[in-house]
Each structure stands twice: as structure tokens, then as C-alpha cells.
Image (cartoon, rainbow, N blue to C red):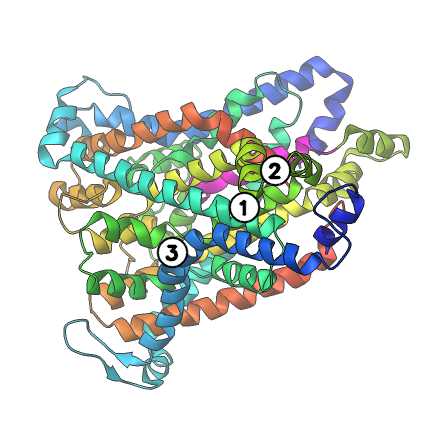
Amino acid sequence: MAVDTLPARTAPRPQAAPAGPTPRWRNKETIAAWLFILPSLIGFLIFTAGPVLAAGVISLLNWNLFSSPTFAGLKNFARLGPDPTFWSALGNTAYFTLVSVPLTILVSLGLALLLNQGLSRIAVFRSLLLLPYATITVAVAFVWIWLYIPHGGLANTVLGWFGINGPAWLISDFWAMPALIAMSVWKSFGFGMVVFLAGLQAIPQQLYEAARVDGSSAWQSFRNVTLPMLSPALFFVIVTSIIGSFQVFDQALIMTNGGPGSRTTTLVMYIYRTGFENYDQGYAAAQSLVLFGFIVVITAAQFVLQRRLVHYDN
Amino acid sequence: MTTDAVTPLLKNPVATRKLIVFACFLVTAVTLVPVVMMVLVAFQSDAESMAAQPSFWPSSWHPENLQRAFDLVPLGRYLVNTVIFAAGTTLLETVTAALAAYAFARLNFPGRSWLFGIYLATLMIPSQVTLIPQFILVAKLQGIDTWPGMILPHAFTAIGVFLLRQFFLGIPRDYEEAARLDGANRWQAFIRVIVPLAVPAIATLAVFKFIGQWNNLLWPLVISNSDSTRTAAVGLQVFQDINGTQWNLLLMAATITTVPLIVLFFLTQRWFIRGITMSGLGGR
């Protein structure tokens, strides 16, 4: 659309002869476009889009990789219903997402607001706070196991200062998941913080001045200026955080190995076990597709909400 | 949030400033505790690190733990493998994504929105959906434990195309039109105008991708089954199996594999952060 109007705007372009040049110009542009896209598209079709379709086919098969596959119809999906481990993995993943995403957003936003108070050394704090984001999950998961040592570990030592008898964290039915969530918030808040900080710094100061002239309190300025102006960034971080949370695996594998029992077995971990420990590829594919279904619905809902809640400048 | 606590102090700007600086110091210190402890415990003696009552500051320093960690598993080899894996996927993804993103942002062709829709649709597909088909594909192509098998399936995700397209859309068309009027073709306009302007966005994508792949556990876990392609993340898991919970060596191994990434982060963070600011992630 916009491209079509361009030759008209830059009228003195020599090639843009009046007699039917548009189709040819478009045609050349089409060829150029395909040349630009092709390297990405070939790889994308083979290694990303293709496997997505293949997952659908594999989910309909009985396949253990060693023998030839047989057609199973929808049996793999039917197996999900009575499989308690699948439901608990789904529940654990939902629990993880519902708690860790809002917490991560709050921490990210709070720290971004703190750093945005006009400090001279803001860059130093920003880098240091971003550090956890730039570490290897597996490596820092080790440290967090150490922090969570029930007797004399750092977490319980600190709680002891306040007279709290800390739980057995990673081996506690109740506390294992919160422990994983705390580690995950620590690991990932830096990303949102940087995005929010950039968003905050892009808000024109005049908007705050106008709000002040109108007699807005600090909270009203935050509510009426900061939040709307930051809403596209918030939306972006929320969507990516939820998708990321649904894929939580590394820290759960290293820190709890899904335990105690299956209290922290996440969906990816269950899919990994089904596919690569039980070699039940068809069933693993079916599980992954059901998860995908959930993500599609949640993300679509967010995009619908976005129309109402997110403020875009242009 | 913080505003309520700060407002009464606003009449005294010096106190407010001190409070903010103190808060920044505090949250930063708390945030860094796990990283600092990782390094401290790594240098403790066996007895100290395994004691029933863990200690925080090492009572004696044991730099020989470094050599002992390398002796247990070939961490050096794993680090080299990690760089090959992360750099390979990053380079492939960045180059192909930049090209495709330009076409999606600037060129009109039939099926553009349809094709971009397919890319977008895969954006929210969790990695485990493609994990099993990718594994089977690589296995059928005899790619298990090879570099192409490791790298190719993770070099063509939609996120790069998506991010760079967003950025390219924000570059004023006039710049490119000026080059086109000077006789540059699409390719020249892309290389001479778009790419130089998009360096921060491309650098952002590259750093994100590199850090993400350095972190990737699941894919190397299923594809690499020998030291020749094993990455640091998987190597650490192997280390955990061999070593049990001998904390000083475990955290030494963690330190060894994390420090290069932290160094890289500090070296590239200017691009990284500036890239986020400019690439539209910041809410444009």
C-alpha cells in the first residue's frame, strides 16, 4: 500500500514511466523479495515449520525410533486423559507461569522505575542487575541448590536471622516450586528491566510536566502517563515471558529433577522423559501439541486484550 | 510503587537521592549474592565445602580446584564446543534473518503477509513441539553428534526475522529512497543504507541469540552424545553426575563455564542495551 504511493510522491523518478509500469516494477520487486527471503525460508521450512507439521503426523504414530512406526490414530491423545503425570506436569507449568510471570514483571518494572530516578551511575547498576540474565542456567542452578541447603544454607540462614525456621526447599512438597520460581525470577528479570528502562527513558518529559500542571500526584502520573506509554513494552515482555515460562526445563531438571515426586515436573521435562527416556515419540509429540494448543489460546487472548489495553503512538 | 515512599522526601532532594542510591546498592548486592557465592565456594577446601554447616567466606583459598575441575571432565573442550554451537547458530540466524526481514519490511510481493503470518505463527510454538521431529530428522540424516546436526535446526527461528523487521519498519523510507534515486538497487540499498543503520538491532539479535544458545541445554542434551560436540551446559550436567555434590568442584565448574559468558556480556553490553533501546523492544 504505502509502497505503491511512493513513486507518485517522488515523482521525477525516470523509470516510473506512466504507461503501465506498475506490474513490471512489482514483478521485479517480487523477485528481489524472494531472493532476500529464500536463505531464511529454506532453513525455516526444513527446520522450524516442517518439524511443526511433522509433530502433527508423529503424534498419530506409535514410534519408539528403533522399530518402524505404526499408525495409532488419536490413541496418543486419548492416553493424555487418564495420565496423571501429564496433568500434574500441566498444572505445575501453569503454577510456575502464573506466579513467575507477574513476579518477574513486577521486579523488572520496579527496578526499571528505581533506576530511572535520574542517577548518574545508572549504567553500572543496570549492567550488574542484568548479570543474572547473562549467566548459564545450569551453572547458576547449582549455586541455587547450594543456597537452598536446608540446614545452614544461605536462604535458611537469612530466614533464621528473622527467627524463621526455613523449609527444606527443594525436597519439600510445598516449597520446591516456589524455590524454582524464585530462582527463575532472579535469572530472568534483567531482560524486562532493560526493556522497561528503555521504554521509560523514551517517554517525553513534557507529558509529566503537563500532568504536573494538571495537578497529578506521583501515582496519577504513573497511572496516566507512565503505564500507557509503557504498555507496548509491557505487552511485549508479558507475551515473551509467558511463552518462556511454558518452556521451563533447565532449572527444574538440575535443581529438583522434577521432584519431590512429580511436584516440579514441568511439561517440557515430561515430554523430554517420554521422548528420550521412554522413547515414546508419538506420545511425546501429542503432549507437545496439546501444550502448543494452550499457548495459542493464551497468546491469542493476550492479543485481543492488547487492542483494548495497549497504547500505541501512531 | 516506589513513588509513595519517595514523595514525602521529595522536599529534600539530597535525602531522596541518597535513598535511591542506597536502594540501588541494596538490590544490586542482593542480586549478585548467588554469583559471588558461586565463586567463593569454588575456592573452598573439600572439607569446608562439604561440611554439614556450609560456610560462606573460604577459610583457606584453593586455586588448585580450577585444575581439579578440568581434570574431572574436559571443560575446556566443552567451552570450545559451546562457542562453535552458539557462534554457528548466531551467524546463520542473523544473516538470513536480516535478509528476510528486509523483504518483509520493505518489499511488496504477493503472499507477503501470509508468509510473515507463518513465521509469526511459529514464534509462539514451544521448542518441545519441534524437538522430537527435529531429533528424528537429524537422526535420519546421520546428524547425531555432528555440528550440522547441532547447529542447523536452531539457526532458523522466526524471532530474528520478527525483531529485525520491526526495526527496519522504523527506519525512514526516505533514506533508502534517496539511495534508490542515486541508482542503487535493492541489494545495494540494503547493504549501504539499512544494514549500517540496523547495526544495533543486528548486534542485539546476535547477542541474545549467542547468550541463548550458550544457555541451551535441551537440544545439545539430546543431540550430542560425546565430548566432540558436548556443550558446557550439558557438560555441567555430566559433571554433576560424576561429581555428586562436591560443592567446591561443582561450583568451580559452574564458574569456569559462566565467567566467559559474563565477560562477553560486559564487552557487548553497550550494543546489547543500546540495541534494545533502539530496536523497538522499548515500546515503540
Question: Given this view, does label 3 or label 2 mark the residue nearer the observer?
Answer: 3
- Res A62 → quadrant: bottom left
- Image position of B22 with respect to A90: above or below: above
**Quadrant of the drawing holding the C terminus of chain B:** top right
Q: Chain of mark 2?
A: A
| Residue occupying image coordinates x 17% and y 40% | B245
Magenta span: A184-203
| Crowdedness near tag 2: few (<14), some (14–19) or many (≥20) residues, C-alpha within 10 Å | many
| Residue occupying image coordinates x 46% and y 42% | A188
Magenta segment main secondary structure: helix
The residue that disc 2 covers is: A196
**Quadrant of the drawing holding the N terminus of chain B:** top right
Asked if both marks, 3 and 2, belong to the same chain, the answer given is yes
Q: Residue furthest left?
A: B71
The residue that disc 3 covers is: A43
The residue that disc 1 covers is: B163
**Residue B128 on the magenta segment:** no
Asked if both marks, 1 and 3, belong to the same chain, the answer given is no
| Crowdedness near tag 3: few (<14), some (14–19) or many (≥20) residues, C-alpha within 10 Å | many
The Cα atoms of the two marked residues, 1 and 3, are separated by 18 Å
Residue A232 rendering spot, x and y as whole percentages: 66, 47
